[in-house]
Amino acid sequence: MPKHAIEANFDGLVGPTHNYAGLSWGNVASKNNVNEVSNPKEAALQGLAKMKKLADRGYVQGVLPPHERPHIPTLKALGYTGSDASILASVGKENPVILSAVASASCMWTANAATVSPSADTHDHRVHFTPANLSAKFHRSIEHVVTGRALKSIFSDEAYFAHHPALPSVAQFGDEGAANHTRLCAGYGDPGVELFVYGGVAFDDLAPGPRRFPARQTLEASQAIARLHGLSDAHVVFAQQNPAAIDAGVFHNDVIAVGNGNVLFYHQQAFLEESRVLADINARLAGVELAPVRVPEAEVPLQDAVASYLFNSQLLNGPDGMLLAVPGECREIASVSEYLDRLVASGGPIRAVEVFDVKQSMRNGGGPACLRLRVVLRDDELQAMHHGVLLTDALYERLTTWVAAHYRDRLSQEDLADPMLLDECRHALDELTGILGLGLIYDFQH
Ligand SMILES: N=C(N)NCCC[C@H](NC(=O)CCC(=O)O)C(=O)O
C-alpha cells in the first residue's frame, strides 16, 4: 500500500553577489545581458515573493541558502596568495572573468543543485540525493561541495535519507541535476518513472549532438545517477534532447519540458525520439496513463519558447487540476500568451496559469522552475527533515528583513573586487545559517 507523499519545493535564496557576467555560453539570456548592472536586493525579494505566494497556497516550500561568494578558497587553489583584499585586487585586475566566476550567485538555480529520487523509487526505500557536478561551467562547478553540506544538514536522518558525492568532475560525466530529470507518477507516493534527459553521449563519437552550443548533460552521467540511487531499470527512461533545441538555446531540458504526476508538458522539438520516449514512459507507468501536453511549433515557435521560458514553469497539483506557474515574460510574447489562454480553456489537465515576476533571475536564464528543487517526501520523511528551512510567515518576514539589511541594490562587474562586498556577504551568511538553523556549512565558518 503506497504511503501518502507530497512534493516540497526548495528554492534557492538569491545571494548578495547576484550579477550579470555572461558566463554561460549556450544560455542566450546570460550572454545578452552581460555587464548589465544587477539588483541583488530586488532579485532576492522577487524569489522570496514567489516562495511566499506558493506557501500561502498550501504548497510545502523550503529555502536553500546562497553560497559564500566571491569564493576565496577557489582563488587560492588557482594560485592567488595574500590577504583576501589583495587576492581580490589581483584577480580583478589580471583575470576579471575568473573573479566573476567565483563571485557568481548561480547556486540560486537549485534545479541544478542535485538529482533527487523519492523513496518510492529507490532500492532501499530512502530518498537519494546526488549534488550535480555542473562540470560544464567553471562558475557552477564549485557549487556542489556546499550544496552537499546544505542538503546533508537539512536531510540528516540516515534512516530516511541517503547522500552521494557529486560524480567525477569531468565533461564525460557532466551532470546538471534535476533540470534534466523529471518524474512521472500516479500519486507522489507511488513508484514513478524517472525520465533522465541527456544532451550527448560522451563515449560514442558517432552519437548525435549539438553543433553550436555545448551539451551539458551526458547519458553516462544520467546512467550513473540511476545506478547510485538504486532505481530499477523497469522504472527509468533515458531520452536524448533534440540537438537542434540545444543549438537554439535550450541548455537544460527544463527550458523545453516539465512534468508532474502523469502530465508531461513539452515542446514538439524537445526530444530526439519523441514517440519512443512517450511509449517507454507509458509502458513503465503504473496505475495511470501518461497525459502528454505537446506544444506544436506552429503554435509556439521554439525561439518564442526559449525567449519566454514557457516550459521553465512549475507544474503543480492544484485543488482543481494542475497549476502552471509561469514567468512574466510569457505574457509579453503574443504566441505564448495566446497559447496559455487556449491551454487553460481546453479542458485538459492544466487548469490555471499564475504569473511570477522573477526578472532579475530571468536575465541570467533562470525562470521559476530553475529556482526550485523538487523533493517528494512521505509524511514521515517530511517529519524527519530539518524544519528551520520551511517557509512560514515568520520565516518570510525574517528573511525579507535580512535581505533589506544586507543586500545592495546595484552591482556591476567592477564592484566584485570590492573587499567590502566579501565582508557583507560573509556577515550576511553567518547570520543566515543561524536563522535557518543549518550549522556551519561555509568554508569561512570553519
Ligand atoms: N535551467 C535551469 N535549471 N537553470 C538555469 C541556470 C542558469 C545559469 N545561468 C548562469 O549561470 C549565468 C550567470 C552569468 O552569466 O552571470 C546557467 O547557465 O547555468
Image (spheres, grey):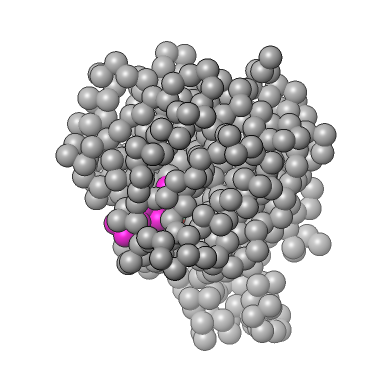
Residue interval drawn in magenta: 246-253
**Residue 268 in sight in this render:** yes
Quarter of the figure with residue 249:
bottom left
In the shown orientation, is residue 210 left or right of residue 99?
left
Work out whether 82 lies above or below 48.
Answer: below
Residue 72 versus residue 350 in the image, above or below: below
Image quarter (top left, top right, bottom left or bottom right) of the N terminus: top right
Q: Which residue occupies the foreground of this view, 383 or 297?
A: 297
Q: Position of residue 225 (x, y in %)?
A: 62, 49
Q: Could you tell me which quadrant the C terminus lies in?
A: bottom right
Q: Where in the figure is residue 27, as x and y percent of width and height? A: 38, 59
| Residue 338 x/y as whole percent | 20, 31
Total tally of numbered discs in the picture: 0
**As drawn, 64 above or below 387:** below
Q: Main secondary structure of the magenta part?
A: loop
Q: Residue at x 48, y 65 (%)?
A: 204
Q: Is residue 69 visible?
A: no
Position of 107 with respect to 378 (left or right) is left
Find out whether residue 364 is within the magenta segment.
Answer: no
Q: In percent of the image, x 75 and y 63: which residue is there? A: 444
Q: Is residue 289 above or below residue 441?
A: above
Name the spot of residue 218 as percent of width and height, x first.
51, 58
> Left or right: 169 with respect to 441?
left
Q: Residue at x 61, y 35 (%)?
A: 375
